[in-house]
Amino acid sequence: MNIQSLSALLAAIVTFAIGSSVLLRDRRQPPYRRFAALCFSLCVWHIAVFLKLTLESEWAYFVSLYAAVLIPIATARFFRPFLTDERQARMKVTPRSLAGIGIGWGIVITYCIVFRKLGIHRTLVFKSLLAAYVFVGLYTSMVSVYRKYRNTLTPGEKTSLMYLCIGGVAAITLVGLDFVPSAGAPLNALGNIITIIYMYFISQTLFRYRLLDVNEVLGKMVVLSTLVLILASIYGLLVAWVPPAYTGVFFFNTLVASFVILILFEPLRAVIEGPIQKWMFRERYELKIRIDLLRGTLANVIDIKEAARVTMLSIDESRRATHAAAYLVDADGGGYDLLGFVGQKPAERLDAVARRVFFERLQTTHQPISIEQLEREHAERSAREVETETIDAIARALAEMNAALCIPLVSDEQVLGLLCLKDERLREAYAADEVDLFRGVAAQMAIIIQNTKLYDRMKERDRLAALGEMAAGLAHEIRNPLGAIKGAAQLLLPPSPSSSGDTLEPAPAQDSQQFLGIIVEEANRLNRVVSQFLDYARPFRGELSPLDVNEVVKKTAQLITPPPVTTPDGEARPPVEVVLALGDELPRIRADAEQLRQVFLNLAINAVQAMPEGGRVTISTSVRKGGRRGAPAQFLEVRFRDSGPGIPQAVLKNLFIPFYTTKEKGTGLGLPISQRIIENHGGTIEVRSRIGVGSTFTVVLPALEAEVC
């Protein structure tokens, strides 16, 4: 038994293990099955070579011939998916043509077995022709990989394909030299060792869905070799001392050694991988430590804005990104707003309709999108002369976010946000392990978004419950005395003259009458406050039905049109002009007409009251195209624009806070009530204002059965 036979046995065992590990991961995927077939073909060939060299068995020799015939076919079938260029796809040497030649060789080998006394299989011509078939077939697959390398544009994939081609050629050549006595003597067993490393390289490529670089392969080989040495030492210490005569003790110690190895494997792997990763891949190791700390911090965060801030800070400190950003979907799903960023500021908002192709891909796949992946797809489509507009649109979206990698924050099959990363110092800056780390952060941020929404709903529910209890107590404690106050004050006031000509009773003194009027006025005001407070706290009970929003606007305009006033020169004109600019053929909406009229009336009255010196209120309606939950949608806009003095920024941000008011006798509940009504209809109220120009309140409501062109 020489080193060549031992290396063949080692190669057989390891290739069988690699092929089995691939099938155990997922036997349903065609690349996995084809790679396993290649591994098992190599395993059979190596074990047959081992038996031929050690036992000098003629049958082992014939088995090695059959296996040698299968290896080029299995290799071509596996490497075929790497070919995407039409010129490569039309190559003369294909898996099908190799299979035809292989069947012919199978017949020839069978003939040699039947008539082996003729010794055809021992002749130099037979061996040379079979070797030519095997090695030409193997080198042809490497030529195909080389052509793919020449036609690849992205530097990262180009380098990886170069490794794949060089490693394959080296393994094939060295294995061939093993069987040439004059050339193979100095290199005995090296071909088998290179084959093992090469097959391990490809298996890791399959598992990680990308080609590895040399550093990654070396790191994994170092970890694997260290584990093998430690575990082999443990096994050897437990079984080496047993004399061959004590078979029972030997098997017992073997069983104990196996248990010990299985128990120690995972802890040893964790202990070994840490220092080696830290030594060979310092930046990646530090990133892993930083991400682990970040995920521990995020576990205690419930606010998504705080989560985005902490995430951006950790990414910045990791020095693995020059640009990073986090986006969150807005309330109606029409776009994604910027939460936080590192480096150059990206776009503050991404409209879901404008970037429809990008978000459709995220929503469909729920997988990260990288610029390198897009470049590969672009090159493949260009080679096949297929349109590349969708790829270009996705790439433009990434450029708008200053991102080379975009990871969706997914929960309940919905894309709730985006985590964007870029390291402009490197091409293909993030390995598969690092992408997995960032995907873990994205998954945790998605959970925080859901928790934030749930927490906000719980706070709103608790707030409304408290308001409801307060409202009930307030109504009970105030309304009863209000009725008595108002009744007593009305009895003290002089009665109004009647149409029947009844005489008036004596009226109180002027001062008393003034005070009594104040009592009635304030009583009415308190009653109004209580009523509005109850309206705000009361759950939504509107009856939704399809309606024309223009009809509601017209009825509202009739209620707010003020009577004309007479100017000093005798001309009659309204103090505030109300102008309607209603759109034609608007889609209908589903809403409660009375509650909608209440909102419109409140906004219109506010606009009129904002112009005590007179002005113009323009009420207009139109259609807005947008998005809802990531899909195109159509909305109705009702705008109330005044020409008043505008709203200061300090006031603008507090407009919808209950009981906040700038009016002398306002309650501060009109706008909050309006906002709740519109939100219960699935819409929003937007406010824009410019000092000295005026303000615009826009009610946005989803259209009924919207159709987007």
Image (tube, grey):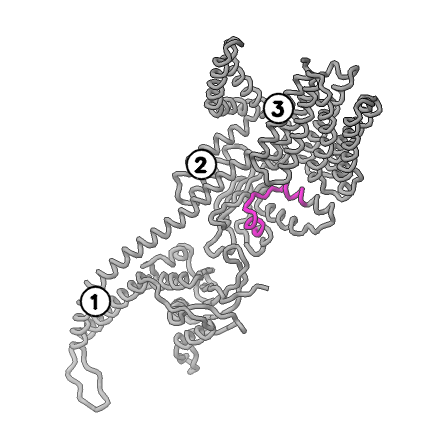
Is residue 665 placed above or below 78 in the rendered structure?
below
> What residue does disc 1 label?
479
Magenta span: chief secondary structure: helix
Badge 1 crowding class, 10 Å Cα cut-off, few under 14, some 14 to 19, many 20 or more, is some
> What residue does disc 2 label?
295
Magenta segment includes 196: no
Q: Which amino acid does label 3 sit on?
A: Ile
Q: In the figure, is residue 427 to the left or right of 495? A: right
Magenta segment includes 360: yes
Query: What residue lies at 46% left-to-right and 62% top-to-bottom?
Result: 692
Q: In which quadrant of the rendered view does residue 140 lie?
A: top right
Is residue 414 placed above or below 614 in the rendered structure?
above
Residue contact between numbered discs 2 and 1, judged by CB atoms under 8 Å: no
Q: What residue type is labelled 1?
A: Arg
Q: In the figure, is residue 477 to the left or right of 2? A: left
- Local secondary structure at mark 2: helix
- Local secondary structure at mark 1: helix
Badge 2 crowding class, 10 Å Cα cut-off, few under 14, some 14 to 19, many 20 or more, is some
Query: What residue lies at 43% left-to-right and 75% top-to-bottom?
Result: 557
Q: What stretch is highlighted in magenta?
A: 359-377
Q: In which quadrant of the rendered view does residue 103 lie?
A: top right
- Local secondary structure at mark 3: helix
Badge 3 crowding class, 10 Å Cα cut-off, few under 14, some 14 to 19, many 20 or more, is some
> What residue does disc 3 label?
13
Front position among marks 2 and 1: 2
Residue 667 spot, x, y in % from top left: 31, 63
Disc 3 to disc 2, how far (Cα)?
Answer: 41 Å
Disc 2 to disc 1, how far (Cα)?
Answer: 54 Å
Looking at the rendered image, the quarter that the C terminus falls into is bottom right
Q: In the figure, is residue 315 to the left or right of 185? A: left
Query: What residue lies at 66% left-to-right and 33% top-to-bottom?
Result: 37
